[in-house]
Amino acid sequence: MKDGKLTARQLVDFYLARIDAYDKKGPALNAVILINPRAREIADELDAKLKASGPIGPLHGVPVLLKDNTNTADMPTTGGSLSLEGYVPPEDATIVKKMKAAGAIIIAKTNLHEFAVWGETISSLGGQTRNPYDLTRTPGGSSGGTGAGLAANFGLVGIGTDTINSIRSPASANSLVGIRPTVGLVSRTGIIPYSFVQDAAGPLARTLTDAVKTLNVLVGYDAGDPATAWNVGHVEEDYTTFLKADGLKGARIGIVETLFGKEPVHQDVNNVTREAIRRMEEAGATMVSIRDPMLDTNKLVSGVSVHLYDLKPDLNSYLSDPKANAPVKSLEEIIASGKFSPNIGDEIRKSQGLDRDGAEYKDRLFKRAKLRDRVMQIMAENQLDALVYPHQQRLVVPIGARQVERNGILGSATGFPAITVPGGFSPPSESAPIGVPVGVELLGRPWDEATLIRLAYSFEQATKFRRPPESTPPIQ
């Protein structure tokens, strides 16, 4: 752009042409809920500013795909729900303000699993999003619109939110990088909440470099989100300084054996992940097998995660805010309206009947504290820099099935940072011409995103596993 070879307007036009060709037509990915009607106008304004005084920030002219549970004061924010159709919040989310100040253009709001409640990316407002690598499968979720859109090159970077798996699941399913930061590193102010205990917001991108440059803009203290007070003194000035190609040399990484499946349905993922681990070792890392019965996905989801207990009170706090003036004021009103996907009916009705005053919620918080201590203890005893495991124990599911056996709960139940990177592909099939993507996840200590970035980047550069989907080729 500085050399005059590219303008923000040309970049926006390029991405809008791809959205037009592939979102509702062709493979019909259905990743986008709304295109920003002012995207071209904003691009023109940025081009004029560049000419007059230079770039306004590190994301100058960068088109961003934004999950539609993140407030935008100039476009509706719906959570994918008909109950919020047309709702325009009074102000941008904190991270949107930060991105705009850095020069980013919100090119589109993307589909999600309604209210981020599950993992197939189907909503009453946006319908079903499809996986560009295998059009018969889901794109993961809940940030699957961002994931499918980035894989199909509808934007340069994207934003997701993650309560259990929801940034890393689409990253795994769409051969992307997904960063779930330590809870409190990135503000959640102005994001439709699911669980303030577990919610995190973070970047998705096709490369770790793009994801990390976006993370740089998102981090920092925000008075609107008390959890961010904990990040003071822990925020790196520039996370890109940890993008080191030799970052795996001398590292010690624990292989969480209990997060691998043992049935034939798990074999494709196991094969890809074991090869990825071999490549980490080849790049200079020492791999240590870790077996601990506490690190069990099913037990953590069913007995430790607090998401369903938090959904009602935390969502209600967003909807009932007098300044928000939302069309529905509570989860109870959403249920009564009937304006939601049947896919989330069981979860929201169950949440409506739960409360945080009982012994069960307190027991889960106690188990969460024990889990955090145990993970830190495992890492200390084995002198580990990170833990590694497949994000999903089996391939992302076909459309119509429920997403199962995802391992993201380890990061979300502890609140620790985790990065999912492309680990390879399953064997090709009739519906998946280059195979189904498999994501490998690295988990680290709180506030130690720097180490995870160093390890993940070294792995990415040593393998370069990502390949674009064949369903969305370059436009001639």
Image: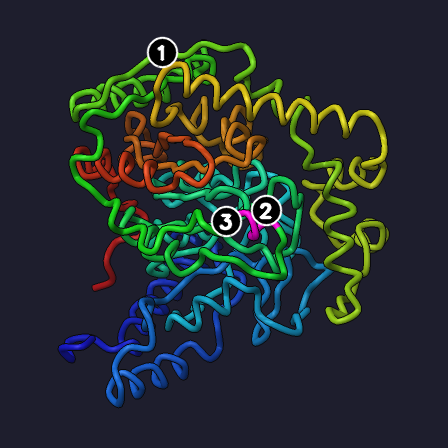
Label 1 close to label 3 by CB (< 8 Å): no
Question: Which quadrant is home to the N terminus?
Answer: bottom left
Give the mark, 2 or 1, whose residue is nearer the N terminus. Answer: 2
Element carrying mark 1: strand
Give amino acid for label 2: His
Quick check: 2 above or below 93? below
The answer to whether residue 416 is left or right of residue 269 is: right
Quick check: 9 above or below 85? below
Element carrying mark 2: loop
| Stretch of the chain drawn in magenta | 227-231
User: Picture coordinates of residue 146 (x, y %)?
Assistant: 45, 52
Q: Residue at x 55, y 31 (%)?
A: 414
- Which residue is tagged 3? 231
Give amino acid for label 1: Ser
- Examine the image and state in which quarter residue 158 appears: bottom left
Q: Main secondary structure of the magenta part?
A: helix
- Examine the image and state in which quarter residue 429 appears: top left
Q: CA separation, marks 3 and 2?
A: 29 Å
Name, please, the residue furthest toward the front: 233
- Which residue is tagged 1? 289
User: Picture coordinates of residue 68 (x, y %)?
Assistant: 56, 59
Element carrying mark 3: helix
- Which residue is tagged 2? 113
Q: CA separation, marks 1 and 3?
A: 31 Å
Question: Which quadrant is home to the C terminus?
Answer: bottom left
Label 2 close to label 1 by CB (< 8 Å): no
Which numbered mark, 2 or 1, is in the foreground of this view? 1
Quick check: 458 above or below 93? above
Which numbered mark, 3 or 2, is in the foreground of this view? 3
